[in-house]
Image: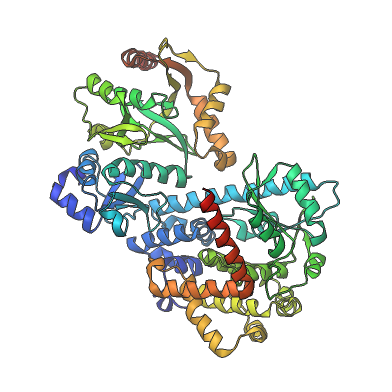
Amino acid sequence: MTTAQTMGLSPLLRALRTPAEAIGFSVTEWETLLRQGRATRLLGRVWHQFSRAGILAAVPDPVARRLHAAFVEADYYRRTLLWETDRLHHAFHGTGISFILLKGGAYAAAGLDLAYGRPAGDIDVLVAQESILAAEEVLLRHGWEHVIDDGYDQQYYRRWMHELPPLRHSVRDTELDLHHAIVPRTSRLRPDMSLLHAAAVTVDERGTRVLAPVDMLLHCVVHLFHDGEIRDAFRDLVDIDALLRWLGQDPDLWRQLVPRARQLGLERPLFYALRYATKILDTPVPAAILREAAVGAPQVPVQRLMDLVVPRAMAPELNAYRRWATRLSTVVLKSRAHWLRMAPPRLALHLARKSVRRLIAAKAA
Amino acid sequence: MRLGELSSEEVRTRLTQHEIRLRVGPFSISVASDQPSFWPAFHFLYQDFPLLEDDVPVEFRIGLVYPPGIRRWFRRQVLFFLDDATPFEPFTSALALPFFEWGFNWCIYEHVYEFLVMHAAVLARDGKALILPGPPGSGKSTLCAALAFRGWRLLSDEFALFDIASGALFPLPRPVGLKEQSIGVIRAFASDADVGPTFTDTRKGTVAHLRPPSRAVASADEPAMPHWLIFPTYSRDADNKLEPLAKASAFALASESCFNYRALGVDGFSALSRIIDRCACFEVAFNDIDTMVRTLDQLATRSERT
């Protein structure tokens, strides 16, 4: 894509797509980059991209300091994830429970470029469904505590979600999500977890395991298109972009992508991910792969609607949250995510229970 | 051009209709506000600060504005904005200036990782810096304000910003927050001290701000090298004597006074080691400002002779 064609894009998008274009930024564009990068927590990522593109010298001092600071902060989180991984090995040693790191923890342990400048908070861990309660017990013995005390909310997680209620370490304060699946039990998607476990790979001499490269991407894809957190959606898309570029280095991995998605029943989210990563972030994906992935395309009217709302909800525009079109797009996507995660009758029952409990609590107070 | 060269009318117009762009130490900030209580206090306390050159981007874009809806009129309140985000609950409108100072501090300890940031007052004589770390209540702000009127150059009353590679301290002169009795103490101590409006009923009780001395603001781009590290504590029955502190203890105390020591990892450790190596380290319990000022004066003079 030429400079002329990208002129209409926001400074953050331009900085992520073609870092070298930032050299010509005006004062206003630099300021907009800081605002958009701060709102999406991508400033550290931008620093990393600029550094790899070798254009740091062209960044004005105040902007460079803000980007660098964000990178340093993100790198602290990256090291924290590595330390937490060490502590997990320590906790699970000799218990016979094997675990797989997901998301940020996995990127850090595997040493992916994506782990640099990426602000990560929680550590996400996957264990087999049959060992999840034993794993929880091990963690509770090693200083992890439940964040949620409420019995109903606890039960809600245990009954319907793909993870246990979140844990927090009493000393180190890190949050941990213990997963037994990559989608909620209530979701219409039913990827066979045993396939993911079987394909998991070891990334260091200590035996740290992460999902196979293609599965790692598919997990990220499911997370983006089946989650209510539209707020963080753009950051997820940036992860997908980086993972696709990484996979793209190995033609064999490209060839595995669509067949694996079909095997796991994840063609639809993969289709969306490829479509919007290429559209919004200009991610290089071979045309043959895009054609192959079209098996996951929805009906034409649905696709039109998604094409209308996804870029609006994600693309960080100036004052994005104030624009009505963005708000409407966000509502559409959130409703969609809820619809996919939980069938409406069950959702209604859950919301009714929540409100009755809130009323009782209010009366008691 | 300095802020003080603008008329109060001009300041008000810019703050309400656009923004005022300032350089404050190493930082470039912009401020916008529709709060009448804020305009004159800001104009007075920041009068010596230079307006930002046109080609410098702003890194912290701060707003102090009425919340939408009824709270503008009923229980007058003000919101603090960094960009489009509001990290705090609304505050009483009359306290917009202390809220700004507090919010700006938050920007620094929440977002600054390009320096090693220590919670400390910093002053300098002949390019040699005196660092006074301390939590609120340690008396560091009062001591700092007093020294700023007795031959020491004020670098900061709140943040020591160390360059990670060289250990040099970047000045961040800003209004010095004085609490309760300190306001009277400083007024009595230095008749030429300019103190801004007094705010009662803040979360920290009565608060007023000392306008930073003009020459401190004028030399805000001249770093100083760490030379003395003194941990003060205010206490009623104190002897006001400097007690030498072992370097290892000084290191431990200093690392606890930093906001981002852990996050900086190895870089933080080496930076702080170099700083401690350069410094003569002491602790002191004090209750008398005059004695302290004399003691520190002697310390500085002794170092000149050697």
Name the foreground residue: A57 vs A89. Answer: A89
Q: Position of residue A285 (x, y in %)?
A: 61, 78
Left or right relative to A282: residue B5: left
Q: Position of residue A290 (x, y in %)?
A: 63, 83
> Going 53% across and 63% down the picture, which residue do you hit?
A232
> Going 13% across and 50% down the picture, which residue do you hit?
B9
Residue B137, picture quadrant: top left
Q: Position of residue B178 (x, y in %)?
A: 31, 29
Q: Quadrant of the C terminus of chain B?
A: top left
From this view, report whether residue A139 is shown above or below residue B146. below
Q: According to the image, what is the colour scheme of the structure?
A: rainbow
> Going 62% across and 60% down the picture, which residue do you hit?
A113
Q: Position of residue A340 (x, y in %)?
A: 62, 75
Q: Residue furthest front?
A: A363
Q: Residue furthest bottom?
A: A300
Q: Is residue A7 visible?
A: no
Q: Is residue B234 visible?
A: yes
Name the foreground residue: B260 vs A62. Answer: B260
Left or right relative to B286: residue A288: right
Left or right relative to A238: residue B91: left
> Going 24% across and 43% down the picture, which residue do you hit?
B42
From this view, report whether residue A212 is shown above or below residue B180. below
Name the foreground residue: B82 vs A274. Answer: B82
Left or right relative to B188: residue A16: right
How many marks the image carries: the answer is 0
